[in-house]
Image (cartoon, grey):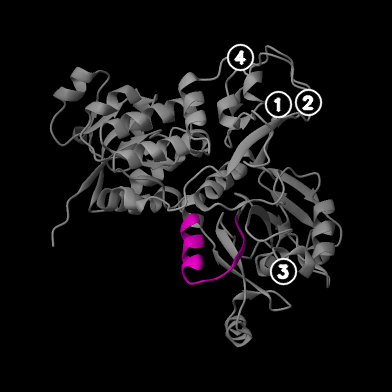
Amino acid sequence: MNRPVVRYALTGAKGGFGRTLLAQTRLTPRAEPAVLCDLDVDGTVTMCRELGFRADELAVCRSADELAARPRGTVAVVPDTGLLAGGDHDVLVEATGSPAAGYRAAVDALEHDRHVVMVSKEVETVAGADLARRAGDRGLGYVPGAGDQPANLVEWFARTREVGLEVVAVGKSGEYDLVLDPATGRLRHLEQEITVDHPEQLLGRTAAIGDTLRARAEAVAAIGRSAAADLCEMAVVADATGLTPDVETLHYPVARTAELADVYALAEHGGIVSRPGVVDVFTVLRRPDEASFAGGVFVVVRTHDPVTWRTLAGKGHVVSRDGRYACLYLPYHLMGVETPLSILDVAARGAAAAPADRGRHVVLGGRARTALPAGRTLAMGGHHHDVDGVAPVLLDVREAPAGAAPLYLAAHTTLARDVAAGEPVRIDDLADPDPALLEAWRAGAPS
């Protein structure tokens, strides 16, 4: 049976995600790019040529007239999301990472009856509920992108729930591991490196997992491991599943993969979780010769029939020492390599492809790291899109401070008044929030 080719538009095309998606769809028979949008048009063209696109396959279009007049079948390369409406595509893949620009692009796509694969988690944490409602009203699909951790984890959670497993915790590893060389004691996390005493003791564990986690936390205290992107991704997962954080900064235990069923047990059984149904992030500790968790995802469940789980433990599955819990995990995330699956699925199934439990269950907010004076601009930048001067926190929507501003609504705004150290940034503290994003945030509030 011949199935139609699905054509997609991609914003933020020149980013790392965009390259992986474009590289993969060169090999995917049924998905192909129609429009690539990035401020760096020349850089996008250069990247495409590196990926094997011929010069005559690409058409740089800086106006609507140029877009309309381009040769049939060429891939348009445009500098402005406002030009996307004139493209010939079925699905928008939104990957700008810009809250305001990404939201506008997604709204415009939906208004032109195009499905949306949302890769910009910054957009999702502010406007996801509004965009999901807009898509549903038009019978369109609004989905996360397979290959990124939120989509992978939402799917993995749904799989475990579908077979009746009781979920205690879900989460992912941080993007980068703690790699410890037992011969030298050198402990590396990206460009950060320290030397630790008794490295073999850190790699092993004591009888009580809590003691082991505390010893590791003390040993790596000088290394910064948390990132706004981690909390952002867990916010997406929380809103798609109804699970919420145990603590607002997440636990971030330093753990070996084989320990996860013990680490994420309930506190009454020696673990770190205060209640079932939480989202969290851990930092992998491994030797240089061991495989990475690779930013993968996990679900910790209660076991049921002891014989079943003893059998599975014997086959190498991660089961807690007391046999009460098991960890089911996917040790990878492949970014845009898997996203063609979402493009094809949402084009085929529309609204049915969206997560079933989508709602607003958390607020990805922020607390002032130090006293922030009125007039200060809360700049957003860096690889993990941190907001200057603001520590990200993930709050259950039922417990969030009144008027708490979502982190990526606050990004790029100017403070209208002073915010004391440790205080949450509130919407009323912002002099100039993006009006459309603010309206979307309020429109998506739980009824």
Q: Position of residue 264 (x, y in %)?
A: 69, 63
**Residue placed farthest to the top in the image?**
375
Query: Quadrant location of residue 141?
Result: top left
Disc 2 to disc 1: CB gap under 8 Å = yes
Is disc 2 surrounded by few (<14), some (14 to 19) or many (20+) residues within 10 Å? some
Residue labelled with disc 3: 262
Give how far apart the Cα atoms at labels 1 and 4 are: 16 Å
Amino acid beneath label 2 = Thr
Across and down, in percent, residue 106 comes to 37, 33
Of marks 4 and 2, the one in the foreground:
4
Q: Earlier in the sequence, mark 3 or mark 2?
A: 3
Name the amino acid type tagged 1. Answer: Gly
Residue at x 31% of width, y 49% of height: 346
Q: Which residue is mark 4?
A: 431
Q: Please state which of the two labelled residues, at mark 4 or mark 3, is closer to the viewer.
A: 4
Instruction: Write down the residue under mark 1.
Output: 389
Q: Which residues are magenta?
A: 154-171
